[in-house]
Amino acid sequence: MQTENTTRKIAILAVDGENFEVDGHYQGSDRKARCYTVTKSSDRTIRVENISQFPTHQSIRELMN
């Protein structure tokens, strides 16, 4: 049996003057995302993939430096 994977935009976080979109990746009918992707809104570049916990402002700040 194959389960459907879905991606949903769940947050936009403003960090140091830049906006970052957080997408949650879900499997089947799960209510909790199995991982997260952070994308920089201004140029749509993926900054970090497969984060296991929801990113905080501070964790995004650390990942970008």
Image (cartoon, grey):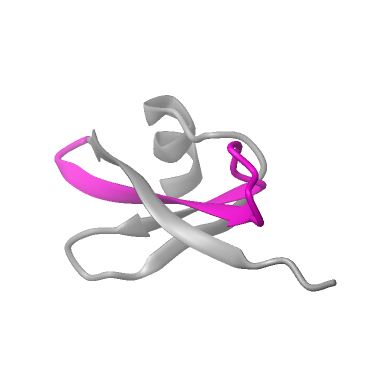
11 relative to 41 in the view: left or right: right
On screen, residue 35 above or below 5 = above
Q: Position of residue 20 (x, y in %)?
A: 29, 48
Front residue (pair 40, 25): 25
Q: Position of residue 57 (x, y in %)?
A: 37, 29
Front residue (pair 13, 18): 13
Q: Position of residue 62 (x, y in %)?
A: 48, 36
On screen, residue 48 above or below 5 = above
On screen, residue 52 above or below 40 = above
- Looking at the rendered image, the quarter that the N terminus falls into is bottom right
Front residue (pair 64, 13): 13
Residue at image position (78%, 73%) is: 2
Q: Is residue 50 magenta?
A: no
Q: Position of residue 49 (x, y in %)?
A: 57, 59
Q: Is residue 19 magenta?
A: yes
Front residue (pair 7, 42): 7
On screen, residue 43 above or below 25 = below
Q: Which residues are magenta?
A: 16-36
